[in-house]
Structures are given as C-alpha cells and as structure tokens.
Image (cartoon, rainbow, N blue to C red):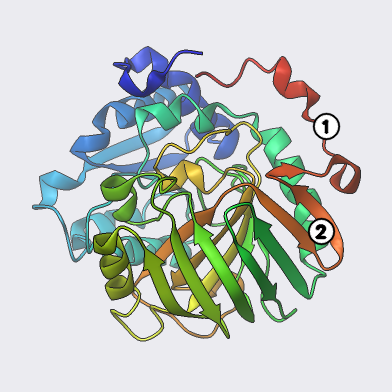
Amino acid sequence: MTDTREKKYTLEDLLPGAHNAVSTCLNVQPGQKLFILADEHSRLISDALLKSANEAGADVKRVILEDYGTRPMTDMPGEILDSLKDYEVAIYCAFPQMNELPTRIQFSRVIEANHIKLAHMVGITERIMCQGMRADYRKVDDVSRRLLNLARQCRTVHVKSLAGTDMIGTFSPKYTWRKTSGIIEEVWSNLPGGEVWTFPDSVDGIFVVDGTVGDYFSAKYGVLSDTPMTLELEGGYLKKASCANKELEREFMEYCHRYQYSDRIGEFAIGTNLAVFEFIGNLLQDEKIPGCHIAFGDPYGSQTGADWSCMTHVDVITRSCDIWIDKEQVMEHGIFVSETLGIDYAYLYEDQSVGF
C-alpha cells in the first residue's frame, strides 16, 4: 500500500471526493445557489469543490477568508455573514487556527437561522479528500441508521478499550441523538461523515486518549499513540488529565477551563465510516473511524436539545473500542458486531471508491 502522506496531490486527485461532497452528500441541483468559504491553506481543495459545483450546474460563489483580514480571526466578517443569507447550500472548507471557534459558531448560527444546508469541512486536507471523502456514503448512512435506532432507545453506553478506557455514558430521552453520516439531510453536517452522537446526561469513568485531540491540537500533537492522555470523568465533567507530554496536559487543561462549561462533556459519539481504517492525526477524519469519541464544551444545543452553551468544543478519541448499548455489544476491538447490526463488511474488499 502506498503511503500517501508525502504525495503531491493534483486537482484531478481531489475531484472524486469533491464530486462526492457536492453531488452525493449535498445533492446539489442545477441552479441551486452554493456558497463556498475557503482559506489559502485549502485553496486546491476548494478549486476541486468549485469545479464539481460548476459541473453540477450550481450558481456558485467562493470566497477566501484571507481576503477579508488576517488569521486567526476572532469574528467572522460581517460581509461574509450577510452574503451567506442569499444562498441555499454552503461549504465551509478551511483549516482551523487557535481561537477561531467563535467565528465558526457565528457562521453556523447564520446557517441554522436561514435553513441553509452546510457541509462543514473544517480541517480538510488533500489526503482526507482521497480517503474519507471517497467513502460510499450510502453504505455509511445505512450503518449509521442501524446504530441510531439502537441508540435512541438506550439508557447507557459502556465503552472499554485495550489502552484502558472504561467509561459509562448515561442518556435521557429528552436529548436527541443525531446522525451525521455524510448524507446531509438536515441543516449541517461534518464531511467526511460517519457518526451518531448526542449530549449525554452524564459520563463517568476513565477515557484514554490514544487517538487524536480536536481543534488546533490535531495539527500540533498528531496521533497520541506514543503519549496517550488519561482523562478522569465524573458526573459528566473532566476532573483530571494525565499525560507524559506535560505541555499537552497543561494546554488541554487550560483549554477545558477557559469558560464556564469548557470542562463539561457536551458530545458523546460513535464513529461509523467503514472506509476509514487508520488514524492520520486530523480529527475531521479520525473521529469517523468506527469507535468512540467524546467532546468537552458546546453541546450543539440547537441539534441535541441541551439547554446550555460554551465558546469552546474539543473532541478526544480512544482506539480499538468494545462498545455495549445497554446490554447489547455492538463493537468488539473497533469492529462492529455484524450479528447485532446486520453489517456486511465484505463489500470493502472490492470497493474501488476509496483511494489510499
């Protein structure tokens, strides 16, 4: 298998993933008004998205963040937010920088208020465009629906891992489980897709982060396989973080105490993208690997029904999970239990949609 991490990507390499985003995930129709927000870091990817949108017959506009000011931006430019209101579909295709989460929240609020369908591709890379974005999203959606049907009824989810994760999430029917499978039917979803998630009533136990940490931590620290971080959770809050990398430990604890509720677990999720097999140190794709991740901070109350908010949100991932929804095991060592969910992995051996 070729290691694509050092590959120099071309526009042609990125077009299959871009076509998937525009035509399969967003189902853009001829004449629809599509707004693409990109940055210089992601320009080649946005070139591919722009070309695919034009081929789909969309009325498309692309803007580059750096044309409106210097990065990092602490506020989304008003001109961008005002023009966004005229569009039916949008793509946010930019690389995250420290302290820019408030700008993305501002963008998302305009999206939700105006019922604009959004592909949220924050942190997208050329490599991800040739891996997770080439998934067969009809199959990912089928897996996600099956898991969602179980999760909606559950009271507890128990997660264990080889690295030492042992935690139990408890759930209330007043909070909504969401499916972000890549097929964007509601207001917005991350791409690449592949997860079911909600706001938990509580999470208690030990969570060992031997995968990836979100926000700007991904680019700085990569995959934590050599320096895992152990989190102690109680009553849905972070009580302690321990890591051999003391700089990461300190930064993470500071991030999770920046605002009220920055240390509160706002998301509990199970990844469902069967076409993603390896961690690459980028949360956008890594969190879609079949397994479990949680996030501290904002619970996306407009989607989950949670009645609080926060100006931070940072995900953490544990590897090789065993997962039980109530008493039923749905995953063993990171592989979905076929007998429980009716998932057939056989198609992956012949699936040509994923490029490595």
Report the number of numbered marks: 2
**Disc 1 or disc 2, which is closer to the eye?**
1
Q: Residue 257 carries which label?
A: none
Q: Residue at x 39, y 34 (%)?
A: 59
Left or right: 92 as drawn, with respect to 186:
left
Q: In the image, residue 4 lies at what x, y percent?
A: 40, 19
The tag on residue 344 is 1
Q: Is mark 2 on a helix, strand or loop?
A: helix
Q: Name the residue under label 2.
A: 149
Taking 143 as reference, is 10 above or below it? Answer: above
Vertically, is 106 above or below 258?
above
Nearer the observer, 122 or 211: 211
> Dot 1, crowdedness within 10 Å: few (<14), some or many (≥20)?
few
* Residue located at (76% from left, 41% from top): 142
Q: How far apart are marks 1 and 2 (CA)?
A: 18 Å
Q: Left or right of 34: which side holds 288?
A: right
Residue 285 shows in this picture: yes
